Amino acid sequence: MSRRTFRKLNGILLLDKALGVSSNKALQDARFLFQAEKAGHTGSLDPLASGMLPVCFGEATKVSGLLLDSDKRYVTTATLGYVSTTGDAEGEKINPRPIPDLSDTDIEAALQAFRGAISQIPPMYSALKKDGQPLYKLARQGVEVERAARAVTIHSLQVLERTATTITLDVVCSKGTYIRTLVEDIGEALGCGAYVSMLRRESVEPFSALRMFTLEELRSLAEQGQETLDAVLLPLDAALPHVPELHLTPEQTARIRQGQRFCLPGNDDAELIKLYDEQGGFIGLGCLQGTCLSVRRLLSY
């Protein structure tokens, strides 16, 4: 039986991760399907969450770190009247409390306190580490440790739908926001407790207007040929639409590829700038300080 051959593939895949699948499993499934030598993702989703998981193949992994700081949009359903030991549907439901007769005005008043800059204490069921040990592993052992509060920003928080026992919310938030913690805190503000019973990541900036693909859709495309499958990949610079760009001459391209620093009069300072060669090919990232250009990260195609 011949071994599968993996290839040097560069690009960004907007994967629609399925429920019940870990981000790493989804990543490896996509890597295997595309036969890519190298792959990474830009921030994991819990198995009980679905939605956008940007997967970076090959040289795209060199820009993936810049996506970790991106804003994200989620749709989540908060089930009222209980809290969960894990903050979501996976945990044991405890501390039952009656649900007040909540009006739309009551809910809006509670949500208002969570818009803008807020402070969150990360949940024990998270990938944060204490002395090298992930908190979720400690939590499974019944160990709880003190966690420092962290500042996050809730850019938008709106009710999409509500029933007698649930509220479905549309959340646009900064990096580092824990939706489980947000829902728990909202539940406490409403006086009845709450846990996440559904969570879907709708988008990751700057890809909010772009289509994502499920593994099933990708497998169907793969049956039509590798070229058809590869056509769904985004170019590397699609991750950096708001970063200024600079087009270099052949001589400048050669110098920058050798790691040389040189001055380019007439250009403004830029902590990060996209660099393109004379054919318009994206070759990496640089920094302009005092009109002097230096390399931040070069791509190798």
Image: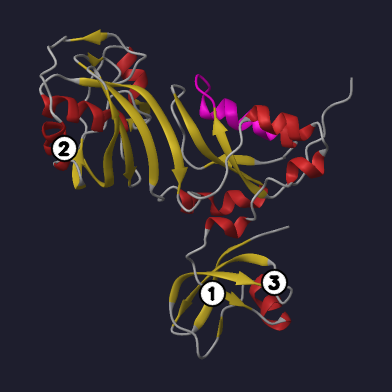
Horizontal side of residue 297 vs 233, given as left or right: left
* Depth check, front residue: 287 or 151: 151
Q: Is residue 71 above or below residue 295?
A: above
Give residue 297's position: percent from left, percent from top. Answer: 57, 62
Sequence-wise, the earlier of marks 2 and 3 is: 2
Mark 1 residue element: strand
Lower sequence index among marks 2 and 1: 2
Give the residue number, with chain letter if any, for mark 2. 108
Q: Position of residue 239 (x, y in %)?
A: 54, 55
Rendered-image quadrant of the C terminus: bottom right
Measured from the top left, where is residue 63 in percent x and y?
55, 54
Q: CA distance from mark 2 to mark 3?
A: 50 Å
Instruction: Answer left or right for 22 relative to 122.
Output: right
| Mark 2 and mark 1: Cα distance apart in space | 50 Å
What amino acid type is highlighted by mark number 1?
Ser
Q: Mark 1 near mark 3, Cβ–Cβ under 8 Å?
A: no
x then y, percent, for residue 203 = 46, 43
Mark 1 vs mark 3, foreground winner is 3
| Other-residue count near label 1 (Cα within 10 Å), few / some / many at <14 / 14–19 / ≥20 | some
> Are there few (<14), some (14-19), or many (20+) residues within 10 Å of tag 2?
few
Q: Would you identify the image quadrant in which residue 87 lies?
A: top left
Residue, disc 3:
280
Q: Which residue is mark 1?
A: 294
* Sequence-earlier tag: 1 or 3: 3
Looking at the rendering, the stretch of residues picked out in magenta corresponds to: 18-31
Q: Amino acid at mark 3?
A: Gly
Other residues around mark 3 within 10 Å, as few (<14) / some (14–19) / many (≥20): few
Q: Amino acid at mark 2?
A: Glu
Q: Nearer the viewer, mark 2 or mark 3?
A: 2
Rendered residue at 14%/16% (across/down): 99
Based on the picture, tell me whether residue 216 belongs to the magenta stretch: no
Tell me the SS state at disc 3: loop
